[in-house]
Amino acid sequence: MLDVKTILRLAVKARGVSKVAAFVGLSREGLSRMLAPTGNPRFRNVWKIARVLGLRLIVVPVEKSDAK
């Protein structure tokens, strides 16, 4: 299963890093660093990127069998 950052990274590459960075208000390099495996994006930036990509972030409760 892919994590949110990996999914966003793949979607940003498909849409165009420079284009998404401009809409989000970041440099291309900053966006790439943020979504790199060692990056640590802030929630507000993840939210902005998702919105630019036409995605909605939804929080749902985990089922008891899925909880750790």
Image: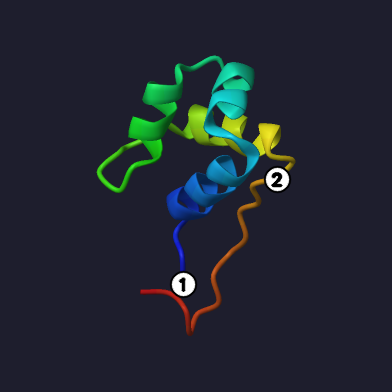
Q: Secondary structure at mark 1?
A: loop
Q: Which color scheme does this rendered protein use? A: rainbow
Q: How far, Cα to Cα, is label 1 from label 2? A: 19 Å
| Residue at image coords 70%, 45% | 55
Res 39 quadrant in image: top left
Q: Position of residue 57 (x, y in %)?
A: 64, 47
Residue 49 placement (x, y as % from top left)? 58, 33
Q: Nearer the viewer, mark 1 or mark 2?
A: 1
Q: Amino acid at mark 1?
A: Met
Count residues near mark 1 (Cα–Cα under 10 Å), then give few for <14, some for 14-19, many for 20+.
few
Disc 2: CA contacts within 10 A as few (<14), some (14-19) or many (>=20): few
Quadrant where the C terminus sits is: bottom left
Depicted 9 relative to depicted 22: above or below: below
The percent position of residue 37, horizontal first and vertical second, equals 30, 48
Residue identifier under label 1: 1
Q: Amino acid at mark 2?
A: Arg
Q: Earlier in the sequence, mark 1 or mark 2?
A: 1
In this rendering, the answer to whether 23 lies above or below 68 is above
Residue drawn where x is 59% and y is 47% of the image? 11
- Residues marked 1 and 2 touching at CB (< 8 Å): no
Local secondary structure at mark 2: loop
Determine which residue is flagged by label 2. 56
In front here: 46 or 25? 25
Farthest bottom residue in view? 65
34 lies left or right of 54: left
Q: Residue at x 54, y 43 (%)?
A: 13
**Considering depth in this image, is 26 or 59 the residue closer to the camera?**
26
